[in-house]
Image: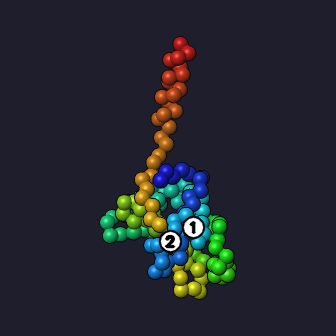
Amino acid sequence: MELQQNTPLTLPLFQLNEHLESRDIESPDMQLSVNLTEDLLANLCQNPAPEQNMSIPIEHYELTDIEASYTAVLSEGHQVQLILNHGPVLSAVLSPAGEDMLFVSPPVDMMPTFDLGLDDDEDEHEDETQNT
């Protein structure tokens, strides 16, 4: 998974229950979209030690494609966290307020990549040599 600043990270969310493993990945209960700010990227660019995880509370996010049966549950309020495990492996958890249920995303293996601008310098250098 490639992460870039100021781009959305969208993860499917499924209700955590005994049927989770048999669910179709293409039919989530809702989609979570989070803008990758500089601070959030800094948190995501860590790799916790084995047997440890990091919980990153998310304040600004958007829920889309919400299954109609869950709109009432979500109207009471909810909290979202991104969970980073060793790997790094990223997942999301949504907790509706006052409800005894969770929504989770499938874990995503990720290796953050960085654009250091090295390719841009090489391209400029190639243009200069072609023009001379």
Q: Determine the image quadrant of residue 13.
A: bottom right
Q: Determine the image quadrant of residue 59.
A: bottom right
Label 1 residue SS:
loop
Q: Residues within 10 Å of mark 2 (few under 14, many from 20)?
A: few
Q: Tell me the residue that label 2 is attached to.
A: 23
**Mark-to-mark CA distance, 2 and 1:** 8 Å
Residue 53 % position (x, y): 39, 69
Query: Can you tell which mark lies on residue 27?
Result: 1
Is residue 118 placed above or below 95 in the rendered structure? Answer: above
Say how many tags the image has. 2
Q: Residues within 10 Å of mark 1 (few under 14, many from 20)?
A: few
Residue at the spot 45% in from the left edge and 73% down from the top edge: 21
Residue at the spot 47% in from the left edge and 72% down from the top edge: 22
Label 2 residue SS:
loop
Residue 11 % position (x, y): 54, 63
Which one is in front, 19 or 111? 19
Residue at the spot 48% in from the left edge and 28% down from the top edge: 122
Check disc 1 and give the amino acid type.
Answer: Ser
Query: Can you tell which mark lies on residue 127?
Result: none
Say if mark 2 contacts mark 1, CB within 8 Å. yes
Whether residue 59 appears in this view of the structure is no
| Residue farthest to the left, as pictured | 50
Q: How is the image coloured?
A: rainbow
Check disc 2 and give the amino acid type.
Answer: Arg
Residue 132 % position (x, y): 53, 13
Residue 38 % position (x, y): 54, 55
